[in-house]
Image: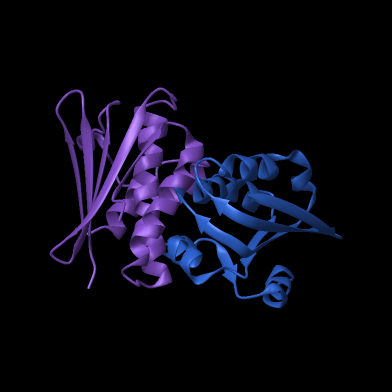
Chain colours: A blue, B purple
Amino acid sequence: MKITQEIKDNTIIMTLDGELDASSSVILDEELSDPKIMSYSKILVDCAKLNYISSAGLGVFISHLQRFEDAQIKLIFYNMQDKVRNVFEILGLDLLMTIVSDYEEARTVSNE
Amino acid sequence: MNNSIRVNCTKKNLKLIRDFVIEYLNAFALSDIMTNQIVLAVDEICANLIIHANHENPDKYIHLAVQKQNGMLKFEITDNGLAFQRSKYKEPNIEDNIRQGKKGGVGIALVNRIMDKVEFESNGTQNVCVLYKKIK
């Protein structure tokens, strides 16, 4: 798993490249636990190159979601592959998290 | 075709297990979503065995064997760690998990929703988890 971050004003664009399993999701947890992240108002997660996610990867997002919501930080996923989106759907997470089709839509939704 | 794999209990080996399952499933030309679901279910069980049942002890092993029987794929995962206690298992409430900032506890729910049948057996030393998935 390779995670890159790009900062644009009050937004972090986080690009996930690879597979999020019980082994690699630790890196994602470290990134999302970084106190600096709380100074932004939007986290846009580019999932185009996220090829796999297991419960450990989902668990990392689940565990930070409330904290971000409480701090009014918007967490938005985009460019998600169908097979990865399906895993979110199996647990109904697509209804509890914001998953949109592409960057443009993520931008629009993040400004609402 | 090689129908079984044995790995020691480190989380890095989950990738080997997934690659093994993907290669086995190649022959059945399943959809991307179906292939991913089956790989995920096996990965979830193996991750639980490696982390919870065997505490990531590299001297311990898990064994996975797969076969096709009567239109069903059968995955048999064996280890010698702590047995999974199904009677103590409770389906998670995802909204509660979110409120509580809980990291774990949704893996078995995925397995139960993906697979057609999930069995856990233990004879005191050896534990066997068997997953069944209907394919056409």
Q: Position of residue A94 (x, y in %)?
A: 49, 65
Q: Quadrant of the C terminus of chain B?
A: bottom left
Is there any visible trace of residue A109 in the rendered image?
A: yes
Above or below — where is B10 with respect to B98?
above
Q: Is residue A12 left or right of residue B44?
A: right
Q: Quadrant of residue A41?
A: bottom right
Q: Which is more toward the observer, A63 or B14? A: B14
Q: Which is more toward the observer, A47 or B74? A: B74
Q: Position of residue B134 (x, y in %)?
A: 21, 65
Is there any visible trace of residue B92 in the rendered image?
A: no
Query: Residue sitting at 73 percent across and 72 percent down?
Result: A107
Q: Is residue B120 left or right of residue A102?
A: left
Query: Residue sitting at 55 percent across and 46 percent down?
Result: A60
Q: Which is more toward the observer, B88 or A66? A: B88
Query: Residue sitting at 70 percent across and 59 percent down?
Result: A15
Q: Position of residue B35 (x, y in %)?
A: 38, 64
